Image (spheres, rainbow, N blue to C red):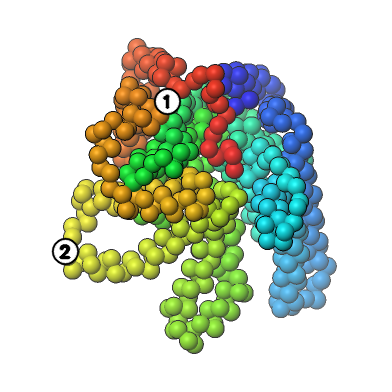
Amino acid sequence: MNIVSLLYLAFVAVVALAYFITPRRFRWVTLLIASVANYLSYDLKLAVWMFITSVTIYVGGLLIDRQEQKFAAQLKVRTDLDRAGKRALKKQNERVKKRWAALVAAVNIAIWVVFKFADLFITALNKYLSGNLSLWHLVLPLGISFYTLQAISYVVDLSRGKCEVQRNYFKLLLWLCFFPQMLQGPICRYRETAPQLYEPHDFDYRRVKFGMQRMLWGYFKKLVIADRVVSVSEKVFGNSGDYQGLVFVIGALAYTIQIYADFSGGMDIISGAAEILGVNMPVNFERPYFSKSISEYWRRWHITLGAWFRDYVFYPLSISRWAQKLTTSLRKRLGPNIAKMIPTYLAMVLVWMLNGIWHGAGWQFVAFGMYQGILIVLGMQFEPVFDWIIAKLKINTNCFSWRLWQMLRTLVLIMGGRIIFKASGLYEAMRIGWSILKVHNIWIFTDGTLFKLGLNAWELFLLFVAVLVLLTVSILQEKGYHIREAIERQNLVFRWLLYIAAIATVILFGVYGPSYDAAGFVYAGF
């Protein structure tokens, strides 16, 4: 069942009712049954892969914990060990735990790679080795890119001593497949969300009310904005050969709005459903389009994914033996400052390349990741130059106009990445970029072209008003204004008029129809 259907709303209501009437000690079991049933409802056959992942991390966790207990027992018995001997024993213990974690991670990454890249590899083999292998046409198990990273975080954190082992397989399974997050994340850490799932929560009217409000806000973003503006982005990028110049800018802006409203709207629905049950999902968005640099943007966009790559790829690479050896080698030739920067920048670009690969199979996704990584590296490298220019020109940076310039500049760079992401391929993305630079067809804003890109005048007006509402709410939130708490302080009549108006807006102006696919979340395909 998709999360914007009436069936899903009914499902959340039934689960919540069942949860609160279940005896407290068994409430986690109710969540488990609901989560497993929800996952099986998507695809019974492909569900086996998620269960395989859950078994691997369960067994891996027990093996890591057994090694830790063995180490503790050795320390008690080996009273003859001096400080150096204890240190050596500890290093051996860490190596064994890391090997178990690496093995579990490798198995799950291999499963993910096969499902996501098998056809790409076969196509390459056929092309370069003149083969005639048939494509497998594998269908991705639901949420595999999300739950795989989440599963890896558990065994790695366990090997690092950052969380405790879960000896109850069914509790671990609940954490991995908790139903609100299965479609598109967020990527949760065990130590943050697992205790909330196992702890029984009593009915709290205020929490349930806030959860429902957040779900309603998510439906507004998804149905009224994302699923309306998608007509423009699909029209432009789906028929890119028919357009040129500034039409692609309109398409890129439409896709930039669409993917934010789609993904953040989905997160609001997910977080709202979890909040009703007493579970606080990690924040995954913090109004990223207000960012003043690419680095800041990625600290605000898909926060749990960025944090995962930072903690489990970038940091380990930065302090690895490879990085240390490279730094030592470069220090004699290039000096200490450059020697420190190069391994860091290389690790950063590699992380972003992997981030791009996570999003999809194809060179355009590699290019998308490299584009982001290179922009971040250039921004860090040239920051002193920019500061010098600002000082020389005596630019006032403590004013709205400067912050607006920074945000618009960042948005333009992000839109460039969206073109790479959305285009049919890397070559097509390059052609679109060249067309934008070469063709200045400004007349499209007055000759009626805008009304031929998938939305008529009335639809464009609705979209404009909806985006304006989203922008207004986002500005208030950016200034620290708590919308739900402010609504709570209003009179009863006003509150219910607002609720009814919001529900009516979603029902009347949401995009539906016989060919509408409510399950079509952009990030659900990853």
Q: Position of residue 367 (x, y in %)?
A: 50, 57
**Amino acid type for the residue under numbered disc 2:** Lys
Q: Foreground mark, 2 or 1?
A: 1
The image position of residue 385, as x and y in percent, is 29, 69
Q: Residue most toward the left? A: 394
Q: Which residue is mark 2?
A: 394
- Image: 124 above or below 74: above
Q: Which residue is mark 1?
A: 224
Left or right of residue 246, residue 375 in this image: right
Q: Callout 1 environment at 10 Å: few (<14), some (14 to 19), or many (20+)?
A: many
Taking the spot 49% from the left edge, 59% from the top edge, the residue there is 370
Residue 432 percent coordinates (x, y)? 41, 49
The image position of residue 41, as x and y in percent, is: 70, 27
CB atoms of marks 2 and 1 within 8 Å: no
- Please report the residue visible at 31 percent of the width from the left and 37 percent of the height from the top: 475
Determine the residue located farthest toward the top in the rendered image.
Answer: 493
Report if residue 226 is visible in the image: no
Task: Give 89 or 58, whichever is nearer the viewer.
Answer: 58
Sequence-wise first label, 2 or 1: 1
Q: Is residue 478 visible?
A: yes
Q: Quadrant of the C terminus?
A: top right
Q: Classify mark 2: helix, strand or loop.
A: loop
Name the foreground residue: 342 vs 473.
342
